[in-house]
Amino acid sequence: MIETNAKGADLGINPGVSNVIALAAGYDCDMALSLPLQVSSITASGLQPVIGFRTFLGQNYTIQYSPTPGTAGSWSDMPGGYTAGNGLNVQITDTNAAVGEARFYRLKKMP
């Protein structure tokens, strides 16, 4: 069985650990891994970018974009880029990207 959860305490491990995937057999946890927050894929659906990432139950996320990531204040929340984590991989399409426009993306965990 594979279980994803936002907090280690829910799995009987270190309560300070978050973004936990536990591989369990029966009621005993055999192994738990903490994974970093990261974009796992950027593909295209037609001419629109599709951003993929792993979510964790109880966490909220938003995708941000910028044409110039090194410029202070250049990051904006992508319309439609907010999602509540459910423990599964998600893919969100950037329906506002213009053809030929350069965009950089990042994933942000929300409070």
Image (cartoon, helix red, strand yellow):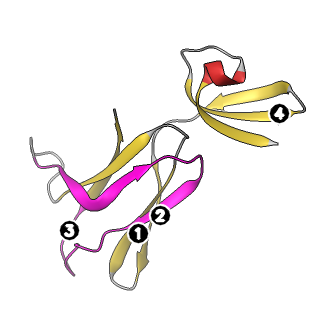
Discs 4/1, front: 4
In the rendered view, would you say 26 is above or below 101?
Answer: above
Q: Residues within 10 Å of mark 3 (few under 14, many from 20)?
A: few
Contact (CB < 8 A) between labels 2 and 1? yes
From the image, tell me which residue sits under label 2: 91
Residue at x 23% of width, y 63% of height? 103
Residue at x 20% of width, y 68% of height? 102
Mark 4 or mark 2: name the one nearer the start of the chain.
4
Disc 2 residue type (three-letter): Gln
The answer to whether 46 appears left or right of 68 in the picture is right
Q: Residues within 10 Å of mark 4 (few under 14, many from 20)?
A: some
Contact (CB < 8 A) between labels 4 and 1? no
Mark 3 or mark 1: name the one nearer the start of the chain.
1
Discs 4/3, front: 4
The magenta-colored residue range is 74-103
Image x and y of residue 47, in percent: 33, 83
Residue at x 11% of width, y 49% of height? 74
